[in-house]
Image (spheres, rainbow, N blue to C red):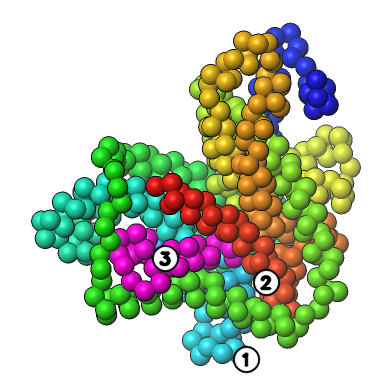
Amino acid sequence: MSKFEALAPARIAGVDGVALFAALATLICAAPALAVFGLALTRSDTGADFGGALLSDGASGTVALMAAGGSGAIVFGAAAAWLVSFCRFPGRGLFEWLLVVPLAAPSYILAYAYASLTWSGGVSPIPVEGFWGAAFVYAVGLYPYIYLAARAAFVSQSSGVFEAARTLGARPAHVFWRVALPLARPAIAAGGALAMMEIAADYGAAHHFGLTTLSTAIFRAWYAHGSPAMALQISAALLLGAIVFLLVERRMRGRASFANTSRNRTAPRYVLAPVSAAAAAVFCAALITFGALLPLAWLVRLALLHANVEDIAQPFMNSMLLSGGGALATLILAAAIATAARRANMFGKASLYAAAMGYAAPGAVLAMGAVALFGLAREAGWIGGLGSGLALTALIWAYAARFSSAGVQPIDAGLARLSKGLDASARTLGAGPWRRFLRIDLPIAAPSLAAAALILFVEILKELPATLILRPFDFDTLAVKAYSYASDERLLEAATPALLIFAAGLAPILILTRELGADRVAR
């Protein structure tokens, strides 16, 4: 017996310890979101409408940003995926991988970079500000969600369909609009939903451009109006909208699903005319430039002008410790949920939905839920004030609830390689649930666990709203430091922490690129 098995809870009175642990993990991840709903309905300010005017203003601002920024991201991502999948033009092979790079930078980092690039003292005469500035940042920063989904759909489609269309004389534009796009509609809808949910959840960019959204309204209700009850109500409305949007998208995508039973080879690519080929190369290069290279180069320049290592040394260490601890806690919960999801029963499905609900919720919403639960514990006399230790615990809890789904997906993919026969053989030989989990499931899923840990580390490193709400007063992270400087319009000082966050985000992008390359070789 290994030391890990010795530490594992025993199977008592026929109770499956792994199932109990998975149930506890599910409850931990779902509790903040459930608390937001419950307390929003039971607590309100006397004489105040539900959410007040902030709710209506924030809802209209969020919907408008989702429509403008999401539409731009869908157009950019779908067009880029079509070009690299079905057309030949200079640099196509390089653009195929570089088009993913803008995912490395969160939207608030792009907002800070473009603000300093186009405001007074910048090099661009065209200002990026206000509503359309935010929509531009979201479009060029989030299009990779649609690009990845659409590209995967395009390359998996049957080559016979496109060859038949070409034989009938269809031009590339007609093939795109009448054949490829309808077949890839479910994937494009899924990518577009992810991008729009990111827009709804974002706080930093919307706040920097002075916009009223549901995320910024939560902070205004709490800090400016001094009304935690109103903040909870707005949080509940935002969470409910995100869940409804996610369910509607999945239902529509399910109805529009397509089956491919004849795929046997990659469809031949169109050889574009010189002018069209140049235009395709310029289009892809522009997406990469505006989504990553230009803001990255500008941040490097500003960081070289004001590289104050002492100023960011402690926030850097805080970020590393917090991201490492949060990633470890989230990884443990995600592994338990992924194990439960492998069981074809209602509990497994409920665990996945609980994780998805947390991922759909913005960080500010889950932070409000954690604060509310700690407040109930304080009223009950179980704890005292929310000191530094409890604040960091609440923050890690919010991270786990927010990003458990991001950890479940790669772990679930790794566990899919475990054959049912192997699990059945271990059960026949007398191995209990914990022994199978520790000696079979986890070793087989080890590469996926490593990838999930890296993804979780970077996601937590970039998270801003939850950190702003729950962090101790003397505990700054790189994200908080960049936000604080940018809020004071000290964009020169904000460059270094923003650049470090950008650089950290490149790690999972490189892993994703490698996986795409491996998938391409396998085909």
Q: Is residue 212 left or right of residue 171?
A: right
Position of 48 with respect to 268 (left or right) is right
Q: Which residue is mark 3?
A: 93
> What secondary structure is the stretch in magenta mostly built from?
helix
Q: Residues within 10 Å of mark 2 (few under 14, many from 20)?
A: many
Give residue 75's position: percent from left, percent from top. Answer: 36, 64
Q: Secondary structure at mark 3?
A: helix
Q: Which residues are magenta?
A: 79-106
In the foreground, 134 or 383: 134
Q: Is residue 59 left or right of residue 492?
A: left
Quickly name the residue at label 2. 499
Q: How many marks?
A: 3
Q: Dot 1, how many residues are within 10 Å of its Cα: few (below 14), some (14-19), or many (20+)?
A: few
Residue 24 percent across, percent down from the top left: 69, 28
Mark toward the viewer: 2 or 3: 3
Residue 467 point in image, percent of width and height: 72, 56
Q: Residue 186 at x, y = what percent?
A: 35, 47
Please name the residue shown 27% across and 80% down the image. Answer: 275
- Which amino acid type is marked by label 2? Leu
Element type where label 1 sits in the image? loop
Pick whichever of labels 2 and 3 is earlier in the sequence: 3
What amino acid is at disc 3?
Gly
**CA gap, disc 2 to disc 3?**
27 Å
Quadrant location of the N terminus in the rendered image: top right
